[in-house]
Image (tube, rainbow, N blue to C red):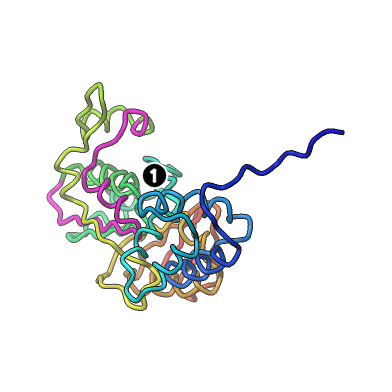
Amino acid sequence: MQATPQTPPREFEFSDRDFEFLRKLVKEKAGIVLADHKRNMVYSRIARRFRALGLNRGEDYVALLAKPNSVELPELLNAITTNLTHFFRENHHFEFLAQQFSAGGRFNTADRIRVWSAGCSAGMEPYSIAMTLCEALENKARQVKILATDLDSTMLDRGREGKYRLDDVEAIPTAYKKKYLHITPHGAQVQTQLRQMIHYKLLNLMQQSWPLKGPFQIIFCRNVMIYFDKETQKVLVGKFAQLLQPGGFLIIGHSENVSGMHPNLKLIGRTIYEKS
């Protein structure tokens, strides 16, 4: 008789009760829905925290998180957050961005340019925005500010530093790499000019009020709301709409759909919504 494959023993104790506590906490604090099939993913990510804290049991980790104002909560959210990103991801969005700020575009004559990258991860999206704007504006003197926010403080630090591996920057057009990056055999550094255009800020989109002001011409929130339930998505879309100027655009990820969630947002392109 062929033996049944056995699940390898876990390094740490992690019960169904522990998972349920973490699932509820992450939903409450970050809006992220962790389905049952995410149980092993959650364990693998928090195992690093167990090692760092010298813990062996899930119930001890739960007790740490249950303390008022637990300093471990940001570490948990950093561990759970998915940070899949790359430069010029879904490139048609950057082509659209360039059209809006190039000669003849809707925002070409704007003196104050405001773009928000919500869920910016390690900075690849806001730097892609910055390069696109510099090219579209042809280096004309404008007041350009890009807000880049994320829940993960470690990703924000990477963005501020602006240092990437060589394979990270492969998707950047060659002309842009020559113009906006300092490349060595060991990696790439974003030029100071671009780094100064971007303000990185820690922001949990689940906060009741956001400590930022609009209006923005364009808000990028791509592949973020896919982790939220429909009720949470609707609340967020309403808050994004409030911060967009009339005629501004909300850009979301290719697998997301917020049609009908706000009366003033109309789908006008591939996952691009215009505010009336």
In the picture of the structure, the residue carrying the numbered disc 1 is 95
Q: Is residue 263 above or below residue 178?
A: below
Q: Is residue 256 left or right of residue 209?
A: right
Q: Residue at x 45, y 53 (%)?
A: 46
Q: Nearer the viewer, residue 224 or 157?
A: 157
Residue 268 coordinates in the image, percent (x, y): 49, 59
Name the residue: 42% across, 70% down: 29
Q: Is residue 114 magenta?
A: no
Q: Which residues are magenta?
A: 140-169
- Residue appearing at x 26%, y 72% in the figure: 211
Residue 119 in which image quadrant:
bottom left
Quadrant position of residue 67: bottom left
Where in the figure is residue 173, as x and y percent of width and height? 33, 31
Q: Residue at x 25, y 60 (%)?
A: 201
Give the camera-side residue of 276 and 71: 71
Numbered disc 1: secondary structure: helix
Residue 142 colored in magenta in the image? yes
Q: Which residue ends up furthest to the top in the rendered image?
A: 185
